[in-house]
Image (cartoon, helix red, strand yellow):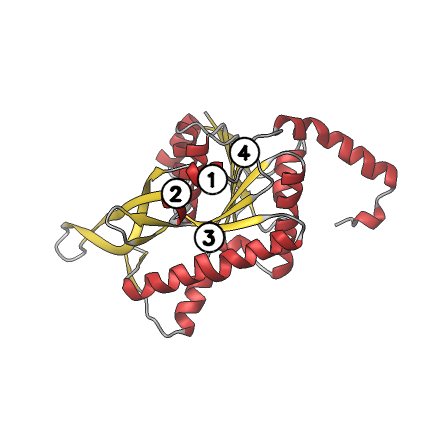
Amino acid sequence: MTSAQDISPLDQARILSEALPHMQQYDEETIVIKYGGHAMGAEETAKAFARDIVLLEQTAINPVVVHGGGPQIATMLKRLGIQSEFAAGLRITDAATIEIVEMVLAGSVNKQLVGYINEAGGKAVGLSGKDGNMVKATKTSRTMVDPDSNIEKAIDLGFVGDPDKVDLTLLNQLIGYELIPVLAPLATSHDGHTLNINADTFAGAVAGALKAKRLLLLTDVPGVLDKSKKLIPELSVKDARKLIADGTISGGMIPKVETCIYALEQGVQGVVIIDGKMRHAVLLELFTNQGTGTLIHK
């Protein structure tokens, strides 16, 4: 990749000038960015992401960051010798596990990302959905078919939830005041328990409540791929549902795309699934004609 030192001052000025119409498109708009645990990668990658977030804020965009932390949680559980149980491919989060999940997400991962943004010259505020009763959630209910009896049974996933109410009181005190919210995907149940929320789902709920201009889901894949594994640059909701129905969109991409559809239905103007390991992926998507990843729109 060409470094800044290899680009002439004239070319640097031209690049900045060409970004102007894109900056104007997002002027004073809210962009929610979900930064996945897998996308975080090495320290250098996370610091580059933090610089890009600060640049957004400096160009009169209001970024809201939601982060995951699955790999970091798995590492800490292993270090502490806590064995995880799984059902239908999903981790069962018991009382001991949710303590570790909260410690890792709202503690180490959240504050590390806050630190990187602040180091880059921003003013990040680390929060979780529990702060200010921002996100209320209900326990997730899932079912699986018992292989022996062939009977569908309910699975108790423990302290895992789905968001059902977002209160913007706290976020509205931060957005537009040069402060960058950094949110850990934890919420409070209606009976006061801490629930772990899938970071994509959490970001979709927050973006929908904020009526964000864009929701960017940074993950570890380039975007939605067709049957020949080529990137699909743009999809309507109708197209996305067809690709789920015919099996083109499968596995872990299904819940991501369903989150995109939900966010669009709640008022988000566009959702983009992006490879978060790509350097400056956020800037490429927002500030260039080419963009990156898959844009899903109504």
Tell me how far mark 4 sits from mark 2, CA to CA. 17 Å
Kindly state the secondary structure of the residue where label 3 is placed: loop
Q: Which residue is mark 3?
A: 68
Kindly state the secondary structure of the residue where label 2 is placed: loop
**Residue placed most toward the observer, 129 or 270:** 129
Q: Characterize the local packing of mark 2: few (<14), some (14-19) or many (20 or more) Cα atoms within 10 angstroms.
A: many
* Of callouts 4 and 2, the N-terminal one: 4
**Residue placed most toward the observer, 243 or 49:** 49
* Of callouts 1 and 4, the N-terminal one: 4
Q: Amino acid at mark 1?
A: Leu
Q: Which mark is residue 5?
A: none
93 lies above or below 206: below
Q: Amino acid at mark 3?
A: Gly
| Quarter of the figure that contains the C terminus | top left
Q: Position of residue 261 (x, y in %)?
A: 41, 32
Q: Position of residue 244 (x, y in %)?
A: 38, 36
Q: Position of residue 184 (x, y in %)?
A: 45, 51
**Residue placed most toward the observer, 232 or 261:** 261
Q: Amino acid at mark 2?
A: Met
Q: Which residue is mark 1?
A: 171
Q: Are marks 4 and 2 in contact (CB under 8 Å)?
A: no
Q: Which mark is residue 134?
A: 2
Q: Are marks 2 and 1 in contact (CB under 8 Å)?
A: yes
